[in-house]
Image (spheres, grey):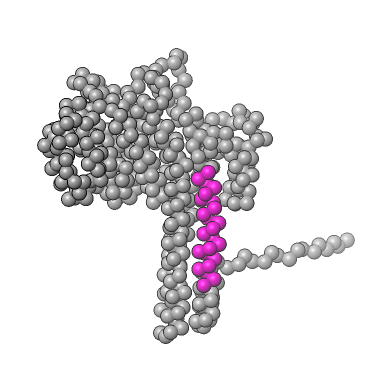
Amino acid sequence: KISYSIRPPPPPPPPPPPRRSTLRAFATGHTGTASAAANVCVDVLGRVLLEVLARRAELGASLLRPGEGLLAGQSGLGHAALSFAKSTAGKGFRGVQGAAARAGAGGKVLGEINDETEEQMRMRTSIGVARAAANFNDLEVVAEYTKRLEGNFLKEIDAGYPRGHDTEQLRMCIKGLGGVVESFSNASERAIERLVSTMLPRVRQIVNEAVGNEGGSAIPAASFMGSPVLSGATSTVSSTRLDYDLDDRAFELAQLSEGYVGRMCSSLDELIEPLGAHFLPKLSDALLIGILGGVSTRLEAAIRKSKFTPLGAISLDSDVRYLMNFAKDRLDSPELKSNVTLCKACLPLARLNQISLLLNVDDLEDVLDLISVSKRKGNWDLKLDDAKTLLSLRVDFEGSKVNDLLQMDDE
C-alpha cells in the first residue's frame, strides 16, 4: 500500500541585504537605477533601522536601572532583575515587540526564585546584562559597517562608471550614507547619556555613603558583591569618612587606614564592571567618563563643606590622584591615559583637580601665579568667587587676606 504525502512549498528566501541588492543595481550599469537603489539603502538604514535600534537601546537603559533592573542597587538586585533572570522570556530579549511584557514578566515565577542557586541566578542575570549591552553595541556596529558600505559603493563607482554628471549624482547619493553614520553615532552617544542618567542616582548614593552623608558609623569588615560575608560573628570596623581638618596624628592615621575614596571606588567597580565586560571599548570608556563626572560633582559639593589644614590639603591631593588612577586603569583608549586628556574629557574631574591644586598652595602669594599659569595652558575653569570660597576653607588662611588678594577682574 503506497501512501503519498504532499510537502508544503519551501518558504521564500529572505530579502537580500542592502549592500547585495544595491550592488546588483550597480551591476546594471544604469546610473538612474543605481541612484534609486542607493537612496532606498540610505532610507532603510537611516530611518527604519535607526529607529528600531534606538528603541532597543532605550529599553536596555531602562532594564539596567540599578536596584530596579539588572544591576545591583543599594539593597542588591531588584525585583525586575530576579524576574528577568528567572523568566524564559529573556531568551527573546532582542525583539522590541515583547519588551514591555518581559520587563514585568516575572510575576508567576518569583515563587521559584529560591529554587535557583546563587550561581545560577548570577549567570542568568549576567546573560540579561549582556543582552542589554548588545543593544548599545548594535548602534556602534551599524555605524562602522555603514561607513565601510559607503567606501565599497564608492569603489564600485570608480571601477564601473564613466565620469560624467550622472555618475557624480550617483556619488552624491552614496555619500548620503555619511549622514547615516553620523546619525547612528549621535544615537549611540544619546543612549550612553541616558544610561548614565539612569545610573547616577546609585552613583550619588555610593559617594554619599563614602563621604559620610548617608549610612551608619560602621561598615562590614568584609563583603562580597555588596553583601556581608557570613562569619561566626558580626564584625565591623570604623569607617573613614571625608575629613580634611587633619593634625599630624590624624594625618598619620589616615595614611594607614582605608580611605573613603578606596571604598567608593570599590563600590563603583561593582556597579560598572558587569557592563564593562560586554560593552565595546568606546562605549565602556564613555560610560566610565559619565560616571566619573557624577562622582566628581558630588565630591566637590562635599569638599566645599569641609575645612582644610595644610596636611588635609595634601590628603585631598592624594585622594584626587587615586580617583584619576582608578579611571585610567579602567579606560581602554590610550588617548585617555594621561591626566591632561582625562581632565579634558571629564570637566567635573578637571575642576576637582584644580580645587586640589588651589588648596595645596603653600602661601597665598602663590595663588595668582597658579591661576595665571594654568589659564595660559587652558587648564583653569574656576571662577574667582569659587577660588575665594575654596581658599577660605584653609584654616591657616585669613578670609580678609583671601579677599584682598583676589580683588581683580575675572578675566
For the point 43% across and 76% down, the residue is 171
Q: Nearer the viewer, residue 91 or 212?
A: 212
Identify whether 145 is placed above or below 333: below
User: How many numbered marks are there?
Assistant: 0
Quadrant of the rendered image containing residue 330 = top left
Q: Nearer the viewer, residue 370 or 62?
A: 370
Q: Position of residue 23 (x, y in %)?
A: 51, 74
- Is 227 left or right of 286, judged from the image as shown? right
Identify whether 221 is placed above or below 315: above
Asked whether residue 315 is drawn in magenta, I would say no
- Principal secondary structure, stretch drawn in magenta: helix
Q: Which quadrant holds the N terminus?
A: bottom right
For the point 27% across and 41% down, the residue is 351
Point out the residue furthest to the right here: 1
Q: Position of residue 47 (x, y in %)?
A: 53, 63
Quadrant of the rendered image containing residue 178 = bottom left
Q: Position of residue 177 (x, y in %)?
A: 45, 68
- Is 401 left or right of 271, judged from the image as shown? left
Q: Position of residue 361 (x, y in %)?
A: 16, 35
- Is 334 left or right of 222, judged from the image as shown? left
- Is 312 left or right of 158, judged from the image as shown? left
For the question of whether residue 321 can be seen, the reply is no
For the point 31% across and 45% down, the residue is 347
Identify whether 113 is placed above or below 136: above
User: Which span of residues is magenta-colored?
Assistant: 39-62
For the point 14% across and 32% down, the residue is 401
Asked whether residue 43 is drawn in magenta, I would say yes
Point out the residue furthest to the top here: 233
For the question of whether residue 345 can be seen, the reply is yes
